[in-house]
Amino acid sequence: MKFASIEKMTNKGNFLACKRLLSARPIMMLVTVIWATPALAGHDHDDIQRVAEAAAAKRMAVSAGRVEAVAQDLDSRLRLAKCDVPLSAELPYDVGRKTRVTAEVRCTGSQPWKIYVPVNLQVWQRVLVAAGPLQRGRMLTEGDMILAERSVTEQARGFMLKPAQAAGYRLKRDLSEGDVITPGVIVAPPLIERGQDVVLEARAGALNVRMAGVALEDGLAGDIITVENRESGRKVEGVVRSGKTVEVLLH
């Protein structure tokens, strides 16, 4: 249609208005086509995340406890071809005790693809905790401890699973009820305590001399402590060999 004919069809002969109308019609048609085009179907993001979580949880499985694996949300704009076979996933690197790992999720179907999915991890186990407030220096008994579920993934200082592992040990600091009892907060009881009567042994070749003494400090097996000779009053250093014996160091 020519613009001259349009001008005859209008009452006022508004040539410019008709021209604008014609130039706008192709744009309107294009918009209509875009709205009418359905979104391309992609593989379900939830399925990808579930597969990644299962792979991470399996790798972190513990003999006694549970694992929580939560995959990071995928970008909502991501479109991966719908896989026509079940997805597979693996963790290509050693996870150790990490709290965040990356799972490689693969489609091996007719339109293969792979994607790396970050997964946050928490491992929960029943570990030793203080049954109540406990003071520094206390020698622990099994009644001082209970087993309670705690997240152990971030327990960098370690943890214990049996009361026998800590019973008979002394606390190095105060604990509140529910605090995790770690190897770092306990110390083995001394074999010899300060003020205790001991036997001093001195060896020189085949010669073995024994005398009475008193410990001037605590000592574990192998520790070097100061001991006073009861007869002479002389102070000497010796190695703790047992709960009663200190071997004098001869120079």
Image: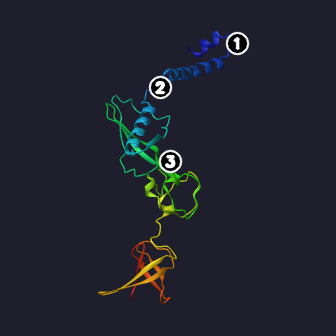
Q: CA distance from mark 3 to mark 2?
A: 45 Å
**Mark 3 sits on what residue?**
150
Q: Secondary structure at mark 3?
A: strand
Give 247 or 181, whichever is nearer the viewer. Answer: 247
Compared with 142, 112 (above or below) is above
84 relative position to 179: left or right: left
Q: CA distance from mark 3 to mark 1?
A: 84 Å
Q: CA distance from mark 2 to mark 1?
A: 45 Å
Local packing at callout 2 (Cα closer than 10 Å; few below 14, some 14-19, many 20+) is: few
Depth check, mark 2 against mark 1: the one in front is 2
- Colouring chosen for the image of the structure: rainbow
**Mark 2 sits on what residue?**
39
Residue 238 drawn at (x, y percent)? 43, 81
Q: Quadrant of the N terminus?
A: top right
**Mark 1 sits on what residue?**
12
Toward which corner of the image does residue 5 lie, by quadrant? top right
